[in-house]
Amino acid sequence: MFNLDRIREEFPILKERVHGHPLVYLDNGATTQRPARVINKMNDAYLRYNANVHRGVHHLSNLCTDANERARQRARDFINAQRAEEIIFTRGTTESINLAAYSYGEAFVRPGDEILVTGMEHHANIVPWQMLCERKGATLKVIPVSDSGELLVEELPRLLTPATRLLAVAHASNVLGTINPVRQLVDAAHAAGARVLIDGAQAVQHLPVDVQALDCDFYAFSAHKMYGPTGVGVLYGKRELLADMPPWQGGGEMIKEVSFERTTYNDLPFKFEAGTPDFIGVIGLGEAIDYLSSIGMSAIAAREEALASRARERLRALPGLVLHGDAPLASPVISFSIPGVHPLDAGTLLDRLGIAVRTGQMCAEPLMHRYGVTSMIRVSFAMYNTFEEIDILLDGLQRVIALLSPSR
């Protein structure tokens, strides 16, 4: 049973007041709040067994190392990776993608090759591939987006060529909410001989993810978007692929032997984890995964779908507001514009009413150009949001339109 009251009790920040109003936090696509149990778990590690991992033979180091490797196992189970060594800890989705772009690119991309992305990608899934193309003399190609916010998959036969080395695609758009047909894309890319990286930053907190069922080669996500700490993320990669990729950073832990003549690299996953990791953050990630698992991803997905469906219905009926994207499969992320009203002004007024939304380019400037705007307003829901908060949002938007819209 989905117990909303109990869930909200686990997030003390939801009781805060902003400018005299109860906080209505609708910026979960940027970062979710953390439940007390995640914070307490990290505090407990700091207070009781803080020590560097994988290095000491003393008791505290062993405790902390065990906790980190349990977190790796939890992450493996959470996305159903085949092996724990396929889970590489990073600082977040951005670093995960950069790691894959650099290391995979060094091993496999040559001049004249092609990297394929989509028109709805976050900058973090565009820029690293542009940098790779510049280094290697490769070409970046783009799958276009329809007016409804869906990928034009019928373009794949034209875009996927023998020169395509990798397809990078968001599991769910951080702007439109569109859930992409990633298994279909994976199959098409593999048939063309290309690898696939999936940016899962906007998916793993909303729906069950099974990387073996998806058959993707890489999957990247961040802890802070799934009720965990900032500065921690995961790159999943197929073991046989990771084994053929060179390290992308050098230092401690990623080595077996070092001399001035040569260095022998460590086994997976440590080959890609140079230096002291954020081991307390990793423990927090493990606790966040336990928290999500205790509720159940299917229950979370159903709750958030109900919230987003109600919000989309209400927003469509609001005169003077334009929704962007209308894909039939979408995460609880909704972006819109109010013609004649700058999103920054709208967001500022909503903030004065205690409502936290995202405004701007959403780190997806090419998608803004696709829709002919410079910025948007975004609301993004989490499982702890309520239907009453949707009503508060609509009342706030009506005030924005009444005060700021030229048509009014």
Image (cartoon, rainbow, N blue to C red):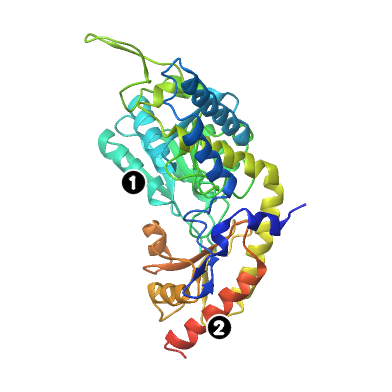
Q: Is residue 246 above or below residue 40?
A: above
Q: Position of residue 90 (x, y in %)?
A: 42, 35
Query: Could you tell me which residue is drawn at 46 percent across and 77 percent down?
Result: 338
In the rendered image, the residue lying farthest to the right is: 1
Q: Which residue is mark 1?
A: 127
Element carrying mark 1: helix
Q: Amino acid at mark 1?
A: Val
Q: Is residue 208 visible?
A: no
Q: What distance separates the C-alpha of mark 2 from that of mark 1?
A: 37 Å
**Foreground residue, 45 or 32?**
45
Picture quadrant where residue 273 is located: top left
Where is residue 355 shown, x and y percent of the image?
51, 70
Residue denoted by label 2: 319
State whether residue 312 is above or below residue 283: below
- What residue lies at 59% left-to-right and 60% top-to-bottom? 327
Q: Position of residue 49 (x, y in %)?
A: 49, 29
Circles 2, 1 touching at the beta carbon (< 8 Å): no
Q: Is residue 45 visible?
A: yes
Type of the residue with mark 2: Pro
